[in-house]
Amino acid sequence: MTILMKVLISFLFVSLVLPVQAQFETYPRTILVITSDELAITGLPLVSTDSPHIDIYSLDAVANVESSMSVLLPPDEDQAMVVMQQRIQQLGKARLEADLVKAYKALTTAMAYDLDRYPAMIFDGEVVIYGLTDISVATKVYQDWLASEQEERTHD
């Protein structure tokens, strides 16, 4: 086999086979987890260059922020307003806003994806897996589903 032939075969392999492999990546890039404080999320992958970006949001976060701000408020409304303003000042308005935005993220995400139960894990913004609290197990379920989808597409 000549060198030219080897180069052509290598080029064909790289240009035809590798793009197909690149299109079918079974490891997710992002995982959004919607849960509650009652359910512990486990199975977080070790951080590596292949690790997906994982965001975990609790549906209880809004109530937690509200209760932390309203704990032991005086019964008098005017006094309660003064105490609340002091707490906001101590915490910082920007920090409180950031906490509230993050707290509402679980609710807005659940509504955006039309989730009807939790826990739910959303892989790459496209695939929802319900009922699992272990990220590594849910990732395996996602990978198996994705592989079967890819297999079905190749047979079509």
Image: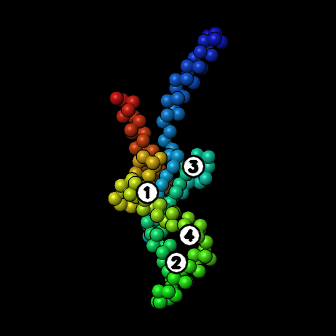
Mark 1 vs 4, N-terminal side: 4
x and y percent of residue 28 in the render?
Answer: 50, 46
Q: Distance between the residues labelled 3 and 2?
A: 35 Å
Q: Dot 1 lies on which element?
A: helix
- Residue wearing tag 3: 51
x and y percent of residue 43 in the render?
Answer: 51, 58
User: Which residue is most to the right?
Assistant: 3
What's under tag 4, amino acid-wise? Answer: Leu
x and y percent of residue 106 in the render?
Answer: 45, 61
Mark 3 vs 4, N-terminal side: 3
Corner quadrant of residue 35: bottom left
Quadrant, the C terminus: top left
- Residue wearing tag 4: 96
Mark 1 vs 2, N-terminal side: 2
Would you say 27 lies left or right of 91 here?
Answer: left
Contact flag, marks 1 and 2 (Cβ < 8 Å): no
| Position above or below: 129 against 82 | above
Q: Dot 2 lies on which element?
A: helix
- Residue wearing tag 2: 69
User: Which residue is most to the front?
Assistant: 78
The numbered disc on residue 109 is: 1
